[in-house]
Amino acid sequence: MSAQARLVVPTRGQGLYEFTADAAAFVREAAADIGLLTAFVRHTSCSLLIQENADPDVRRDLDAFFRRLAPPADDPSMRYLVHRLEGPDDMPAHIKSALTATSLSIPVTAGRLALGAWQGHYLFEHRDAPHRREVVLHLSD
């Protein structure tokens, strides 16, 4: 048994956007008792994370860390960057995406995502402008 769906995650700029409830609903609707959920984002300037979903400070701190790690291309520390056609946030977004993940694998046990108590699925938007990001969910047994 396998099932697949496309999920659109709207973003308002850089930050973490939780989609745990959508992934859990997909698993419930598929009615699989045991399996593996794969989430894959179809973009190169955002990524996916499993991260704490209890304290919003964690999301803010992660976002702040990655902004310091890869500041905009017009920052003096980034003058070595060549790719600048899509704006000062584009190449840093690709760097952040390369350092994180574009897919996640989550076990399904007893018909539910086998996440820890404080874990959630997040799309990590690395661009400044709003986007409609597409995540493919695939459940296999």
Image (tube, helix red, strand yellow):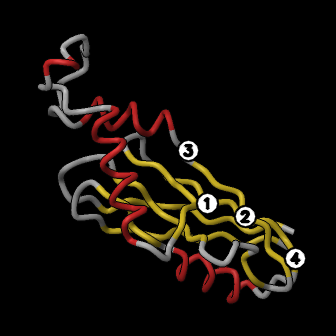
Q: Which residue corresponds to mark 3?
A: 101
Classify mark 1: helix, strand or loop: strand
- First reached walking from the N terminus: tag 1 or tag 4: 4
Residue 123 sits in quarter = bottom left
Q: Residue at x 46, y 49 (%)?
A: 47
- First reached walking from the N terminus: tag 2 or tag 3: 3
Q: Name the kind of residue labelled 4 in the image.
A: Ile
Which image quarter holds the C terminus?
A: bottom right
The reply to whether the C-beta atoms of the residues labelled 2 and 3 are less than 8 Å apart is no
**The label number, if any, that marks residue 106 in the structure image:** 2
Q: Which residue corresponds to mark 4?
A: 34
- First reached walking from the N terminus: tag 3 or tag 4: 4
- First reached walking from the N terminus: tag 2 or tag 4: 4
Measure how far apart labels 2 and 4 are at the Cα level: 11 Å
Measure how far apart labels 3 and 4 are at the Cα level: 24 Å
Q: Residue at x 51, y 54 (%)?
A: 48
Compared with residue 98, is residue 31 higher up or lower down, i.e. above or below? below
Q: Residues within 10 Å of mark 2 (few under 14, many from 20)?
A: some
Q: Which residue corresponds to mark 1?
A: 39
Measure how far apart labels 2 and 3 are at the Cα level: 13 Å
User: Residue 64: where, in percent of width, then height?
Assistant: 30, 48
Compared with residue 126, is residue 32 higher up or lower down, i.e. above or below? below
**The label number, if any, that marks residue 100 in the structure image:** none
Q: Nearer the viewer, residue 28 or 15?
A: 15
Q: Residue at x 39, y 67 (%)?
A: 17
Q: Residue at x 40, y 48 (%)?
A: 46
Measure how far apart labels 2 and 1 are at the Cα level: 8 Å
Q: Nearer the viewer, residue 127 or 51?
A: 51
Classify mark 3: helix, strand or loop: loop
As drawn, is 73 to the left or to the right of 30?
left
Q: Name the kind of residue labelled 3 in the image.
A: Ala
Measure how far apart labels 3 and 1 are at the Cα level: 10 Å
